[in-house]
Amino acid sequence: MNTDELIAQMQADEEEDGKLITPVNYARIRGLAPQVIYYYIRRGYITWMRCDCGRKVIEKEEADEYLRSVGKLKPNGCRDNQ
C-alpha cells in the first residue's frame, strides 16, 4: 500500500465513523448515485443541515433508515452495500 492509498483509506474510515456526512460521500460509501440522495433531500425525506465549515451534510443513520424503508439499502446486518 502506497501513501496515497493509505490516505484514501484513512479518509474512508473517517467518513464511515462520523455521524454527519456530505451527500456525495454518503452515496459513495453506500454504492448509490449522489443524484438519488439529493432527490430525497429535495423531496424532504432526508433532512440536511449546514455544518460549521459551510458544507451541506446529512445524518448517516437517518438516511440509512429511510433508504432501507424504501428498499434502496439492504436491511441492517447485510454486508453487501456497506
Image: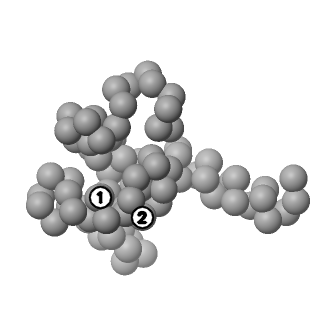
Q: Amino acid at mark 2?
A: Val
Mark 2–mark 1 contact, CB under 8 Å?
Answer: yes
Q: What's the residue at 69%, 54% (across, down)?
A: 10
Q: For residue 29, say whether it is visible.
A: yes
Give the residue number, with chain letter if any, for mark 2: 24
- Give the x, y percent position of residue 49: 26, 65
Between 25 and 74, the residue placed more toward the observer is: 74
- Give the x, y percent position of residue 82: 50, 38
Q: Is residue 58 above or below residue 64?
A: below
Left or right for 17, reference 33: right
**Mark 2 to mark 1: distance in Å?**
8 Å
Q: Amino acid at mark 1?
A: Ile
Q: Is residue 50 above or below residue 41?
A: below
Left or right for 22, reference 16: left
Left or right for 37, reference 78: left
Between 54 and 78, the residue placed more toward the observer is: 78
Report which quarter residue 72 is drawn in. top left
Label 1 element class: helix
Q: For residue 57, say whether it is visible.
A: no
Q: Residues within 10 Å of mark 1 (few under 14, many from 20)?
A: many
Q: What is the residue that sits farthest to the left in this orientation?
A: 43
Give the residue number, with chain letter if any, for mark 1: 37
- The disc, 2 or 1, on the residue closer to the chain's N-terminal end is 2
Label number found at residue 12: none
